[in-house]
Image (cartoon, helix red, strand yellow):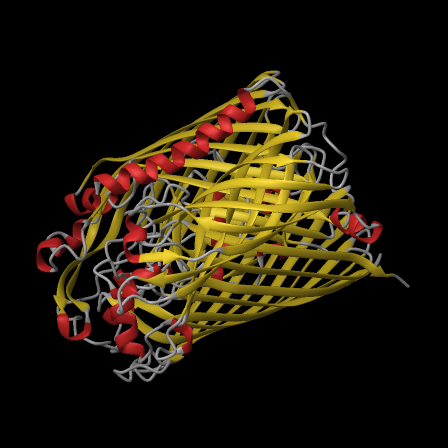
């Protein structure tokens, strides 16, 4: 396949102002700890509630796949960073936010990039989340959080009547506790997190309980996190440790059902920023990550028996030359995969070199560019980003951008790719017949425009347009049939290689600060596949074409705050599951109806804000809210959450 | 079905009408006291008078509730707990005792003389403790979200004492929703919030 050079103006919202106040821009959004507290976020995946420019999908309500609008979740994987260090996904298990060894209360801020971006040597044109954890206050500090929730719809006393229904269990209790010590030169933080999630929805209960010998199938997540930093005015070094044991039900696409799995994640990383001179700096990262999928008791004796180790080294040198900020960096990544289901140990080596530049064009405009050349195993490719931002008037900005990305086959590796490469784990059904090596180089071109204007100091308007062109996509062609013996579906799967298509995404937002303590936000987004092969257009129907939302934030200068959001999602269709309704007596459906979702959070602080109590409601109107034909419907749910924060309990 | 709809609508309508009447009548909202400065402890006896479909399956006996309220930045917030026994009308229906714990918010308005009207919102957890010793332990109780409206009348016969009458319309969000209309009468006593508690609440 020939490569084409695209020299285009690109918009790149780099992480240049991570410490800025909470703001929502069309392509880059910053969510602060205050936003998180006010919205009553319970788990990390709740961050998606605050992001209108992404679509998130889940079967079980705990593990979520998400991607910016215009990219279907699951078909592309965003990059997740914790304090500059990437947490790399796994081809079998992917990466879900709730499996990170972090509590929501560990977060200081989150940057969410919808546009293509290069951050700390990590490139992504499919979204990037950069989580910045809280630094330790001076002295010894203690914090914790306890949350219990419940989904409505229990049978109550009607359980032995004609109105009987399945019992819907509680959510959690989730608990996290942390201890930290901070001083002028160093700080150290540690904590642990425990989350429980019951799979009691009728859509999942039967197939999960039968394979797990458990009438109340449950997922349990236990994690530990520790971080330390040593800093002076000219350098900072950071150590990051995270460990997660996630006893889960891992959805195995070839089977079309979940398999009980113990999913362990271990991260250890060292990173640093060093100011060499007033105009130059050096950044480095050394990181190791291990992901293991082991057996969890199940009736079929299934065990993925998979271990993947990833070692990453990254260095970047930045220098200001005149008015130009330039940088050059290097990434070296080794991925080692071991499994008895592989013919041998699989080792991939990746090296990439990149350069960045930020150039002022005038007193009103700037240009930022990045170019990355990479080699993965025996394949080579490159990515390019270009952005130009213009201050049209004192209150009006326009940014134009373009990105070109080549995602090489080892970078796309998912369960289907690994099966084609010889991973012979069949799950319940040997459904890999006919899969050759289908995964080719994926090329993605993203062009975008963003405009925003402050009509008044209290009123801001934004609009954005993104066009994406993809070719070399591999689409899973999967037909599902019910298997009553396991209350599951059996699937026949094949892969359609070299699919091409174009999508367009149009967004608009208005933010109005009507009172100092009252803010309103409106959002409208439309996404569509505008052209392309039929499999591409079919896959795109799984994303809501229209998304509308209204958010109100009330935070008076007292101890109480309130947050509310109304979201409308248009209907979606999962064409891979066409006919499933007829086959299962309407137990499942490929059509997901549109939904109007109302979320509400009320928070009050006590004891000079050392303790916060929140009452949180999700889906207040109790709409039938389902993301996936095989997944749970998320009914009206309420949470009670207690946060305590005792900063600087003791100082030397 | 029609009877159920009428009863549910009737109960909700009663609650809304009482609330609206209280706040449209000439009068004035009770002067806003400094938040958390006073505590009011109430004890009441309560009966369920809702005669919807749920009543065809279970009858209830008199119950009791305890409530603690305190002034908030606007109105007052309250926490309370309510217990009531229910008996199944047929053998296969489980008897149970309900434990309803809630958080509420409301406003007070001077009506006439020592009489005040109250109205507000309630949300909480309605627990069913089943008389079902044969089942596994985890099936012997269930909890479900419950929310509703509250309206009442208060007669302050002494500086710190009052007699309270109240109507609470509640909906329990079980798979088949349950509507209840509680009528209660009791008394309450107000006192200053202890300093240590005041520091904790602010």
- Residue found 30% across the figure and 40% down from its top: A544
Residue at 8 percent across and 55 percent down: it is A582
Judge by depth and name the residue closer to the eye, B29 or A178.
B29
Counting from the top left corner in percent of width and height, residue A186 is at 79, 61
Res A464 quadrant in image = top left
- Classify residue A30 by image quadrant: top right
Q: Horizontal placement of A138 versus B110: left or right? A: right
Q: Is residue A267 left or right of residue A276?
A: left
> Viewer-proximal residue, B53 or A418?
B53
Q: Is residue A172 left or right of residue A108?
A: left
Give percent across and percent down for residue A386: 48, 36
Left or right: A27 with respect to A470? Answer: right
Estimate the x, y position of residue B145 in percent, counting from the top left.
44, 52
Quadrant occupied by the C terminus of chain A: bottom right
- Give residue A159's quadrant in the image: bottom left
Q: Position of residue A299 (x, y in %)?
A: 27, 83
Q: Residue furthest front?
A: B157
Point 61% across, 62% down: residue: A285
In the image, what residue occupies the spot 84% across and 50% down? Answer: B195
* Residue A80 can be seen in this image: no
């Amino acid at each position: 396949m020939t490569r084409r050079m695209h020299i285009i103006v690109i918009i790149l919202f780099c992480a240049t102002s991570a410490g800025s106040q909470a703001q929502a821009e069309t392509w880059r959004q910053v969510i602060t700890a205050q936003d998180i507290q006010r919205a009553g976020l319970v788990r990390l995946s709740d961050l998606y509630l605050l992001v209108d420019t992404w679509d998130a999908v889940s079967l079980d309500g705990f593990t979520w796949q998400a991607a910016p609008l215009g990219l279907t979740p699951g078909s592309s994987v965003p990059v997740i960073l914790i304090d500059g260090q990437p947490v790399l996904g796994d081809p079998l298990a992917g990466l879900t936010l709730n499996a990170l060894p972090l509590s929501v209360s560990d977060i200081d801020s989150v940057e969410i990039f919808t546009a293509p971006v290069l951050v700390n040597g990590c490139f992504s044109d499919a979204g990037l989340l950069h989580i910045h954890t809280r630094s330790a206050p001076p002295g010894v500090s203690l914090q914790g959080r306890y949350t219990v929730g419940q989904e409505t719809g229990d049978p109550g006393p009607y359980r032995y009547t004609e109105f009987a229904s399945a019992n819907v269990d509680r959510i959690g209790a989730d608990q996290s506790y942390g201890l930290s010590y901070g001083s002028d030169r160093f700080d150290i933080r540690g904590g642990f997190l425990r989350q429980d999630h019951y799979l009691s929805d009728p859509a999942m209960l039967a197939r999960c309980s039968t394979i797990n010998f458990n009438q109340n199938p449950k997922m349990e997540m236990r994690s530990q996190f520790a971080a330390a930093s040593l800093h002076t005015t000219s350098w900072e070094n950071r150590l990051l440790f995270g460990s997660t044991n996630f006893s889960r039900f891992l959805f195995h696409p070839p089977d079309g059902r979940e398999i009980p799995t113990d999913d362990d994640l271990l991260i250890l990383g060292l990173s640093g920023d060093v100011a060499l001179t007033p105009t130059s700096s050096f950044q480095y990262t050394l990181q190791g990550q291990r992901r293991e999928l082991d057996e969890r008791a199940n009736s079929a004796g299934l065990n993925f028996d998979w271990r993947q180790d990833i070692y990453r080294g990254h260095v970047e040198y930045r220098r200001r030359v005149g008015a130009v900020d330039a940088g050059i960096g290097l990434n070296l990544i080794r991925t080692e995969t071991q499994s008895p289901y592989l013919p041998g140990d699989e080792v991939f080596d990746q090296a990439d070199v990149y350069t960045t530049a930020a150039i002022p064009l005038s007193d009103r405009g700037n240009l930022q560019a990045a170019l990355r050349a990479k080699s993965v195993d025996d394949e080579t490719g490159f990515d390019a980003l270009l952005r130009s931002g213009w201050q049209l008037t004192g209150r009006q900005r326009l940014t134009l951008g373009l990105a070109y990305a080549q995602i090489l086959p080892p970078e796309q590796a998912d369960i289907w790719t690994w099966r084609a490469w010889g991973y012979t784990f069949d799950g319940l059904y040997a459904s890999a017949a006919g899969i050759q090596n289908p995964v080719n180089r994926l090329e993605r071109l993203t062009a975008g425009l963003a405009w925003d204007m402050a009509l008044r100091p209290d009123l801001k308007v934004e609009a954005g347009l993104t066009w994406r062109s993809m070719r070399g996509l591999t689409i899973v062609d999967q037909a599902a049939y019910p298997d009553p013996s396991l209350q599951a579906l059996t699937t026949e799967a094949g892969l359609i290689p070299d699919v091409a298509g174009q999508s367009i995404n149009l967004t608009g937002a208005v933010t109005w600060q009507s009172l100092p303590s009252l803010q309103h936000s409106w959002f409208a987004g439309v996404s569509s596949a505008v052209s392309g092969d039929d499999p591409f257009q079919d896959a795109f129907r799984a994303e809501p074409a229209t998304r509308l939302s209204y958010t109100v934030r009330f935070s008076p200068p007292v101890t109480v705050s309130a947050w509310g959001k109304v979201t409308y999602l248009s209907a979606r269709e999962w064409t891979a599951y066409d006919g499933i309704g007829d086959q299962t007596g309407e137990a499942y459906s490929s059509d997901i109806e549109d939904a109007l979702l109302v979320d509400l959070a009320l928070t009050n602080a006590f004891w000079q804000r050392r303790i916060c109590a929140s009452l949180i409601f999700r889906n207040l109107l109790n709409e039938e809210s389902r993301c996936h034909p095989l997944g749970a419907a998320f009914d009206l749910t309420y949470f009670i959450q207690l946060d305590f924060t005792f900063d600087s309990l003791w100082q030397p | 079905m029609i009877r159920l709809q009428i009863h549910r609508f009737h109960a909700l309508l009663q609650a809304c009408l009482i609330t609206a009447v209280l706040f449209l009548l000439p009068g004035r909202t009770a002067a806003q006291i400094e938040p958390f400065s006073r505590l009011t402890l109430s004890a009441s006896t309560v009966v369920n008078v809702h005669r919807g479909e749920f009543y065809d399956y279970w009858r209830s006996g008199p119950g009791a509730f305890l409530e603690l309220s305190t002034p908030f930045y606007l109105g007052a917030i309250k926490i309370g707990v309510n217990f009531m026994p229910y008996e199944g009308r047929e053998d296969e229906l489980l008897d149970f005792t309900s434990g309803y714990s809630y958080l509420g918010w409301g406003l007070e308005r001077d009506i006439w003389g020592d009489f005040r009207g109250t109205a507000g919102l309630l949300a909480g957890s309605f627990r069913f403790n089943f008389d079902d010793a044969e089942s596994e332990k985890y099936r012997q109780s269930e909890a479900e979200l419950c929310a509703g409206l509250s309206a009442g009348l208060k007669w302050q016969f002494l500086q710190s004492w009052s007699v309270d009458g109240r109507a609470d319309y509640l909906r329990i969000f079980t798979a088949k929703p349950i509507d209840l209309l509680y009528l209660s009468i009791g008394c309450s006593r107000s006192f200053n919030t202890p300093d240590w508690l005041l520091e904790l609440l602010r």
